[in-house]
Image: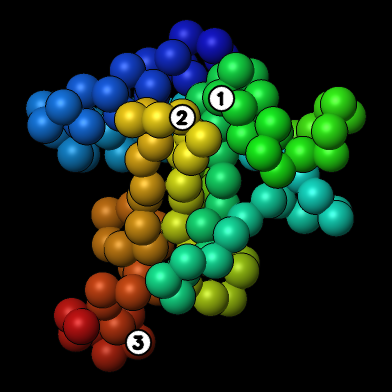
Amino acid sequence: MAQSRAALAERIAERRRGGDDPRALVGEMRRSVLLVPVADGGLWSVRSGGVRWICGFTDEAALARFALHHGRGDEPMDYAALLGARIVDEIVPALGEPAGLAVDIATEDGSMFFPPVTGIVPDAVAVDTTERTGERA
């Protein structure tokens, strides 16, 4: 598991430097187990720009950076370990609103957003397509 999470962090870094294939990054995200904080019986998320972002972290250090600013002081933060594919294929569609995945948001120069678009989330919930009519938005 740790190797898969480290591979995602490395792919994110490469993509942020302007390299790597975006499809390879999405594939790595889908194969990676992410640590998602749990709060009030649900997964931690934030809303920005009309999108609900589920927050996931590639390792315990990235989660700890987030917890410093959003946790309850010295109390440990509960989290679920979820496969990226499960987040974007199952959880995002179940939310009933535009939603995506934000990875390592507390890591300076290391975060990456996977928006609710075709190729990342199922077409039926992607904001750049209208699955019901088969036309692109």
Which element carries disc 2, helix, strand or loop? loop
Q: Please name the residue that numbered disc 2 is placed on.
A: 107
- Precedes in sequence: disc 2 or disc 1: 1
| Residue 29 vertical placement versus 130 (above, below) | above
Rounded to the nearest angstrom, the CA distance separating label 1 from label 3 is: 39 Å
Q: Please name the residue that numbered disc 3 is placed on.
A: 132
**Residue 104 picture location, percent across and down:** 48, 34
The amino acid type found where label 3 is placed reads: Arg
Nearer to the camera, 80 or 107: 107
**Which residue is painted at 19% across and 39% down in the image?**
22
Mark 2 touching mark 1, by CB under 8 A?
Answer: yes
Q: Please name the residue that numbered disc 1 is placed on.
A: 62
The amino acid type found where label 2 is placed reads: Thr
**Residue 110 picture location, percent across and down:** 37, 29
**Which residue is painted at 29% across and 83% down in the image?**
130
Which element carries disc 1, helix, strand or loop? helix
